[in-house]
Amino acid sequence: MAEITTSLSIGQVAERTGLSVHALRFYEREGLFVNDVRRGPGGRRVYSEDDVDWLTVCIILRASGMPLPALRRYADLVREGAGNEKERLSLMREHHEHVTAQIGRLTQSLDLIRFKVGVYEDLVDQSSVAARQCHAPSLSADGERAPLLRHEAVVE
């Protein structure tokens, strides 16, 4: 029985993947497709469901910070077929380490943002006079600038 292949235009693939037509052409020029992009009548690009599935993998890897050269290398390895699984594993392990470190940095950022949200929620809940003091230094009884917020406390 013959395999039924869905033919999708570049516009349809752009709509389904969220990539622009320009980005799809760029991915093709950069060798990021596993299969050659077919051409229909008049030289128009014709894509398959497999192409859309592969693009989804590429989009996720790029969104996670995989550099284009690494993505290109991964596409080359997949295109070559079986026998290079150790190299694919190495590439994915390296990217896994990068993503894990990135998550750690983002977690630190989120912790700071949560703290700042709490600080400003506290200020907003206080009277308008206290809120105005947020941007002006207050002086302690001895004339020294006193920390306005918990995070401004000086550790000596």
Image (cartoon, helix red, strand yellow):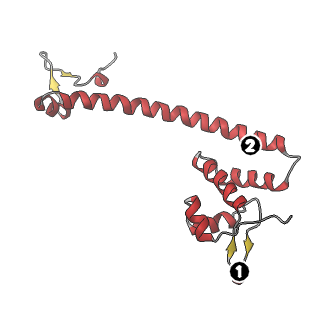
Whether 56 is drawn above or below 44: the answer is above
Q: What is the residue that sits farthest to the bottom in this orientation?
A: 42
Instruction: Describe residue 140's horizontal placement relative to residue 150 as left or right.
Output: left
| Secondary structure of residue under mark 1 | helix
* Neighbourhood count class around disc 2 (C-alpha, 10 Å): few under 14, some 14–19, many 20 upward: some
* Picture quadrant where residue 100 is located: top right
Q: Earlier in the sequence, mark 2 or mark 1?
A: 1
Whether 71 is drawn above or below 30: the answer is above
User: In the image, which is nearer the foreground, mark 2 or mark 1?
Assistant: 1
| Secondary structure of residue under mark 2 | helix
Instruction: Describe residue 85's horizontal placement relative to residue 117 as left or right.
Output: right
Task: Identify the residue at horizontal 72%, vertical 82% (top origin).
Answer: 41
Residue 103 on image: x %, y %: 55, 35
Residue 93 on image: x %, y %: 72, 37
Task: Identify the residue at horizontal 39%, vertical 30% (top origin).
Answer: 112
Residue 136 on image: x %, y %: 17, 32
Task: Identify the residue at horizontal 72%, vertical 78% (top origin).
Answer: 40
Disc 1 marks which residue?
Answer: 43
Disc 1 marks a residue whose amino acid type is: Gly
Give the CA distance from mark 2 to mark 1. Answer: 35 Å
Task: Identify the residue at horizontal 66%, vertical 37% (top origin).
Answer: 96
Which quadrant does the C terminus fall into? top left
* Neighbourhood count class around disc 1 (C-alpha, 10 Å): few under 14, some 14–19, many 20 upward: few
Disc 2 marks which residue?
Answer: 91
Disc 2 marks a residue whose amino acid type is: Leu
